[in-house]
Amino acid sequence: MIATTKAANAYDVALENFDTAADVMGLSNDIREMIKYPERVLTVTIPVRMDNGNIHHFEGYRVQHSMVRGPAKGGIRYHPQVTLDEVKALATWMTWKCAVVNIPFGGAKGGVTCDPKHMSQGELQRMTRRYTSAILPLIGPERDIPAPDVYTNPQTMAWIMDTYSMTKGYPIPGVVTGKPISLGGSLGRNEATGRGVFYTIQSACEHLGLELKGATVAVQGFGNAGSIAAQLLHAAGAKVIAASDSTGCVYNKDGLNVPELILMKALCGHVEGFPESEAISPSELLALKCDILVPAALENTVREDNASTVRAKIVAEAANGPLTPAADRILQNKGVFIIPDILCNAGGVTVSYFEWVQDEQHLFWEAQDVYNRLERVMKTAFRDVLKIHLEQKVPMRIAANMLGIGRVAEAVQLRAIYP
Ligand code: NAD
């Protein structure tokens, strides 16, 4: 096992979490060798003609971690800090996540190292189409189905679907999820991750005997996952006292007007300068005295150096990998109840699964139907993880990993993939 007194890279963290859970489960070395590592790793070069007329090349990745339980599934991230190790980590977490919510998918992830905030729509479209062509041999509705992640959205998915469909000669909506509704997207997909975060917070509050109405919440990362979670918590009577994005953090001790904040973020692209709020620093946000902290941005937000400042009772990991293992241990020792990422943010992939099912059946469901099914899946997964946490006396993260890894281990044994 690796030492993690300082922030490890995301893939090291993923492997360490695997080993910790596998040790508690007493998983044999043979099974570990079969399920621990990515099945396929593809690195591609993406030459793109930029608006200034020059060709610029970007590096992109698609990692399929596991197809043991079904086609690989995972988002595509556009960000300057995308690395192969990050994509491998995110793909690994997708495998356990799909198994935790018991949907018939394996794990994958993709990414392009780029700065989408400084690219035009034309540049983004050309890059997306070229990237799609480059990963085309790996993807398809029966083999690997991408979805949105950080700085990709339904428009990105529409371009991928079109590029893929052009090679086949007919529309194939099931190749991606998170599409616009008019192209075979599912009602409720856009808000699915935040909604799933909300359901797990409801379950955690119930378990801890904490009243959600009037509870105070801080949200780090006011994007798709963070803002929708904030909106639902606000609607349930919680007080969202702070929110942040990459440009700044806003705070109001009496609670922010979340619907207005969402409107401002949509119109202006930032939360900074929101009326009836004061600016605070990112470290002040993490250290706020509140009931629920929702890290909803990127990995390694809470680390060994700042974990002791966290004063929340519940940390709901809307983001993937927001706590380093060292931070995790510090928060455990402080008695913080952690809803781990592979459970907390699994609502996105769950409704992606619903979208894929609807596309395959050419039969579409009503929004309330999607919400009801999602609530059932998330609350069942929460109960399953909590049971392991309480019975085996292991932290919630290890319990979630044990559930996910256990299901993949069972599948690989039943399939006798490596006789
Ligand atoms: P997004 O692009 O919609 O939002 C990300 C937000 O984080 C943006 O508002 C950005 O300004 C903010 N941000 C970036 N760096 C920040 C920083 N240092 N401090 C504060 N804010 C910062 O992305 P998203 O889809 O909401 O994804 C957020 C997290 O949720 C990621 O970890 C992603 O992997 C995870 N996630 C997303 C989905 C999904 O369906 N969208 C599903 C599962 C997990």
Image (tube, helix red, strand yellow):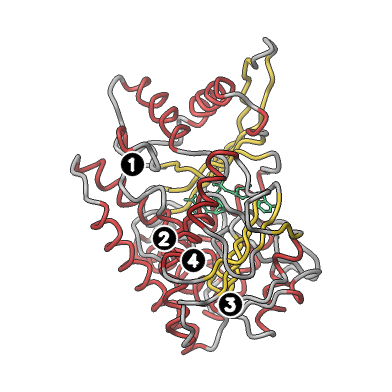
Discs 1, 2 touching: Cβ within 8 Å: no
**Is 220 in front, or is 130?**
220
Residue 61: image x %, image y %?
59, 38
- Where does label 3 land, which residue? 291
Tag 1 or tag 4, which sits nearer the N-term? 1
- Where does label 2 land, which residue? 195
Tag 2 or tag 1, which sits nearer the N-term? 1
Residue labelled 4 has its Cβ within 8 Å of some atom of ligand 1: no
Residue 100: image x %, image y %?
42, 67
User: Which dot, 4 or 3, sits closer to the camera?
Assistant: 3
User: Which dot, 4 or 1, sits closer to the camera?
Assistant: 4
Tag 3 or tag 2, which sits nearer the N-term? 2
- Where does label 4 land, which residue? 344
Tag 3 or tag 1, which sits nearer the N-term? 1
Task: Tell me the amino acid under the disc marked 2.
Answer: Arg
Alpha carbons under labels 4 and 1: distance apart: 26 Å
- Where does label 1 land, which residue? 142
Residue 157: image x %, image y %?
43, 34
Q: Residues within 10 Å of mark 1 (few under 14, many from 20)?
A: few
